[in-house]
Image (tube, grey):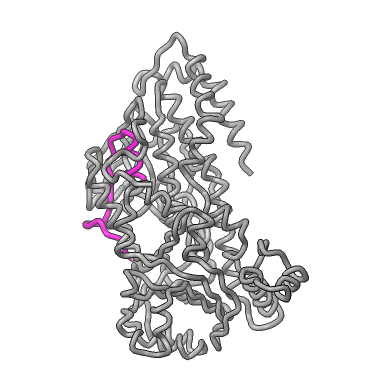
Amino acid sequence: MPVDVHGNIYGERQAAQRLNILVIGGGIGGLAAAFCLAHAGHTVTIFEAARKLSEVGAGLQVSPNVSRLLNRWGMTDRIRECAVEPEALVFRRYNDGEVVGRSHWGETIMMEHGAPYYHMHRADLHHILLERLRQCPRVSVRLSSRIKSLDPNPDPNVTITLVSGEVFEGDMIVGADGVHSLTRQVVCGRADLAQSTGDVALRAVVSTDLMVGDPDLRALVEKPELTTWMGPKRHIMAYCIRGRKEYNIVMLCPDDRAEESYTAEGNVEKMKEDFSDFEPRVIKLLSHVRWILKWRLDERMPLKTWVHPEGRVVLLGDACHPMLPYRAQGAAMAIEDAAVLGNLLSRLAEPVAQHLPLLLHAYERLRYVRATNTQETSALNKYIFHLPDGPEQQARDASMRRAMLAESAHDDAVSQTIAAHGTPTNAANANQWADRKKNREQYSYDADAAVERWWHEEGEGELGLLLAELTPYSSTMTSSSSLVKSKKKSFWQRLIRKKDDKP
């Protein structure tokens, strides 16, 4: 269906009461949030600590749950100019390159999930989001704006204070400030609690010009696939980006006291040594690497809440559910968060002082379980990919081979094998991407549809109850404190009851 790249993503619907929203963080999640909130009718200011809006890192996987949103936002044509559609996901043994698992993607992904799967550079997606954001008249960006503190208590507005001493007021704050989020500390009332996974991620990009002339490496470019080499305590995941002009390589191995930083540089020679027992193609591939980024992988438990008790500060993306990279869903979850938050706040109506907290808690309820489940499946892949050689590794490889057989079943002999060893759905397979149920849950998800269902099943009714409670009173953002207190009990009892529904 054609998409109007200049139109409003919510059609004619915009918030009846428009807010002044402060977004902390200018990464992919922050830009996506600003874009959706501006289309919802709100005025948005982005505060970014860097002197320039740009994205560091390397490759990024844009799965169907995200590509359908980006298409809806009018970005597909620009994405296709620089992205690559992988034909398959392939798992290989580290030492000899034997294929132990394969899942067909390409057209299969589109048929099953209604949207494509892309590989692209993080900086390209960030740039495309920024291009679309600049078409929104209600968005402004402040660079070199590092946050010193924020006050979540509306008196009458919430405020943020920069290290420069400047103070900014707004109706609401969105904390999209990443894994080291200051906003998270304010919302949760405590310092960050992180545990090391024992792994470090090494990221590199190689020009494919260096690969196409080598008969051993040429196929990695000519047949774009997501290739994963699995080894003891280590794995490599690699794929083409930027129209097959570059090859993205992510290497996971034991941590050697690295920083939890997206910009720290690593030691190329040590990296080559760490993977020296991998198959000859990998050795050749890594010989072309000239620099690497090094990122210690820390794990964080799910938060108890993403919304400050005062109902004016909310978390988004890595600030509330930082993802390990083993499932490649970190950016996807942040973009989904932005879509849900924007869609909900496009419905904001009077009485705002009560309706806004209701919508923010609905955002948390709609996102919490999905984000937490994705965190857990990401952590599971660390164990699956890094098994030492031995019985467990052999069982893993056998499981992946069964999934490969199930997917390519085409004769009676293979069908009999499936009947003996498993079903074509590949439930609970070691290759999580072969599990069709998990794929449907992850990739067929539509963030906007999730909001529509909630609105028709609960949201409209909740707004009606608020209006009934407050009639014949009126309420505004700046004069409703006494009314909120007098009517607080029944309203917050409903919110508490719904929060208790979370597992």
**Where are the magenta residues, as a range?**
33-56
Between residue 407 and residue 358, name the one nearer to us: 407
Q: Which corner quadrant of the image does residue 315 belong to?
A: top left
**Residue 238: horizontal and vertical position, in percent?**
44, 75
* Residue in view at x 71 percent, y 80 percent: 391
Is 437 left or right of 164, judged from the image as shown?
right
296 is higher (above) or lower (below) than 331 = below
**Residue 95: horizontal and vertical position, in percent?**
55, 87
Is 275 left or right of 76, judged from the image as shown?
right
* Residue in view at x 55 percent, y 88 percent: 96
Between residue 296 and residue 98, name the one nearer to us: 98
Q: Which corner quadrant of the image does residue 352 belong to?
A: top left
**Residue 299: horizontal and vertical position, in percent?**
52, 61
Q: In the image as oriented, which residue stretches furthest toward the right?
A: 420
Q: Indicate whether residue 185 is drawn in magenta.
A: no
Is 455 left or right of 171, judged from the image as shown?
right
